[in-house]
Image (cartoon, helix red, strand yellow):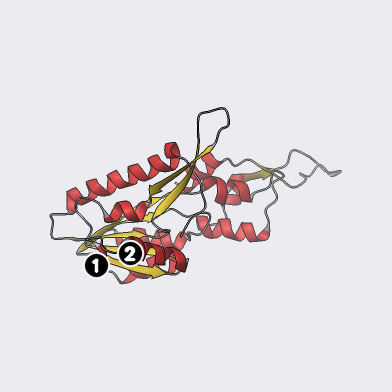
Amino acid sequence: MAQKRFGSVATTGKKFDVIGEYLSMYQRALGNTSLQTVYIDGFAGSGEIPLVELNNNLFDEEVKTVIAGSADRALNVDKPFDHYVFIDKRKKCVEALQKRFQGNPNANRVNYVIGDANEHIQNICRYGNWCFKRGVVLLDPFGSQVDWETIKAIAKTKALDLWYLFPAGLSVFRQIGKDGRVDPTHESSITRLLGTDEWKTAFLKPSKQRDLFDAPVGNEKVVTPESAALYYD
């Protein structure tokens, strides 16, 4: 299944290189212990990432570049995890993953799941025997799909490392208008993402414009992608 092109080798490519290196180091540290290890990818995709690149010439022609995604890199670390859970709500992506990994020596370690990452990860966290397991969860959503309750569930295990590539620009900054107005749908989405509605006082300030009674006229947007990320942290 072909995915929409996004990112570049310098950004997206580097991101997945870092994740792959971390997973290798994680398994070198725990791969020889008595603990079972698990890797959970909440937005596994189809296994490959098509990137947008431009030739450095007069015409700036696009170069077709495809790199391995997170699931591919996790499955092929030197010391494989004992268990893998690849989740995606798109059936075609999961089917593409299954086809991609046919014949992989670690394919029998994989559980493919079609559905909502929040629901399935929360269930895994709730019912897993974490006294004897350790693992890594990767959350790389396209927008505000991750619920705060999922983050809490992961933390509660005290056994899972979390890599959450938080979409501060797309899921927070862009959901608030320049005039400080927030669509009700976006408002509830940001609250679900952050686990509180206190973001309103952090991201919005009373407008400097005043009405006839010297009261502020609405709000002003003061949040930036950077401040949104810091607020989440």
- Residue nearest the viewer, comparing 61 with 76: 61
Q: Which disc number belongs to residue 108?
A: 1
Q: Quick check: 117 left or right of 76? A: right
Q: Residue at x 62, y 57 (%)?
A: 187
Residue on which disc 2 sits:
85
Work out whether mark 2 precedes mark 1 in sequence or the reverse, and give the earlier one.
Answer: 2
* Separation of residues labelled 2 and 1 (CA atoms): 11 Å
> How dense is the environment of label 2, judged by Cα within 10 Å: few (below 14), some, or many (20 and up)?
many
User: Of the residues shown, which amino acid type is indicated by label 2?
Assistant: Val
Q: Residue 165 location in percent, x, y? A: 43, 49
Q: Residue at x 39, y 47 (%)?
A: 67
Q: Residue at x 46, y 66 (%)?
A: 92
Q: Residue 206 location in percent, x, y? A: 70, 44
Q: Which disc number belongs to residue 24?
A: none
- Residue nearest the viewer, comparing 123 with 24: 24
User: Of the residues shown, which amino acid type is indicated by label 1?
Assistant: Asn
Is residue 120 visible in the rendered image? The answer is: yes
- Residue nearest the viewer, comparing 111 with 161: 111
Nearer the camera: disc 2 or disc 1: 1
Q: Quick check: 52 left or right of 206? A: left
Above or below residue 19? Residue 106 is below
Q: Residue 59 location in percent, x, y? A: 58, 31
| Element marked by disc 2 | strand
Above or below residue 145? Residue 128 is below
